[in-house]
Amino acid sequence: MIHAMIDLETLSTNPNAVILTLGAVKFNPFGTGQSDPMYFKVDVDSQTKLGRHVQPETLDWWATQPKKIQEEALGESDRISIDETLKKINKYSVGVDVFWCQGPLFDYAILQNLYAQMGQPCPWNYWAIRDSRTLFSLVPRDPNEKRLEAHNALADCYHQAKKVQKVYKDLGVKNV
């Protein structure tokens, strides 16, 4: 089975949030390593023209982040259209059996809202979505855990996929 971890960075916590960046990696939760990374920045102006949400509190929060993180998430270069975004997600999702994120009421709710707004079906079934936050709550937090680059969608995916693999191993979850 192919698993994928998806993470978004946004300008709001609402389901109709403007998406800044999207990251994804594919992985086997019973193994080690991740593959097939995907990362892109989404055009902000086209989303605001559609009425997608920008939250002042989220803008304030972004202002508190390190400059490197701000520049990556908020910089104008290399942004792709909403249509291209959905095409990339659709293509990436082919063959994926399980879709993970850290809080499905955030990442997948926002993506599902965007797909609905664009009149397109989501490339996953509701029953294929998994929540890494719930899984992580089953084991004690590792006091030595290091985050190299929080709030970068792709770095977050790698981190979360590695943690899923570690928790599966620690709990003795078997591939059946």
Image (cartoon, rainbow, N blue to C red):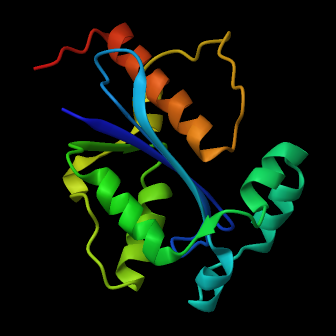
- Image quadrant assignment for residue 56: bottom right
Q: Nearer the viewer, residue 44 or 127?
A: 44
Quadrant location of the N terminus in the rendered image: top left
Name the spot of residue 14 as percent of width and height, x first: 57, 70
Q: Is residue 102 above or below residue 56?
A: above
Q: How many marks?
A: 0
Query: Which residue is pictured at 16% across the width and 18% down the height?
Result: 175
Answer with left or right where residue 18 lies relative to residue 95. Answer: right
Q: Is residue 147 above or below residue 171?
A: below
Name the spot of residue 148 as percent of width and height, x first: 72, 26
Name the spot of residue 58 as percent of width and height, x first: 76, 64
Query: Which residue is pictured at 26% across the width and 42% down the height?
Result: 98
Instruction: Single out the residue that lies furthest toward the front.
Output: 78
Q: Is residue 101 above or below residue 79?
A: above
Name the spot of residue 154 as percent of width and height, x first: 57, 41
Answer with left or right where residue 40 lies relative to residue 69. Answer: left
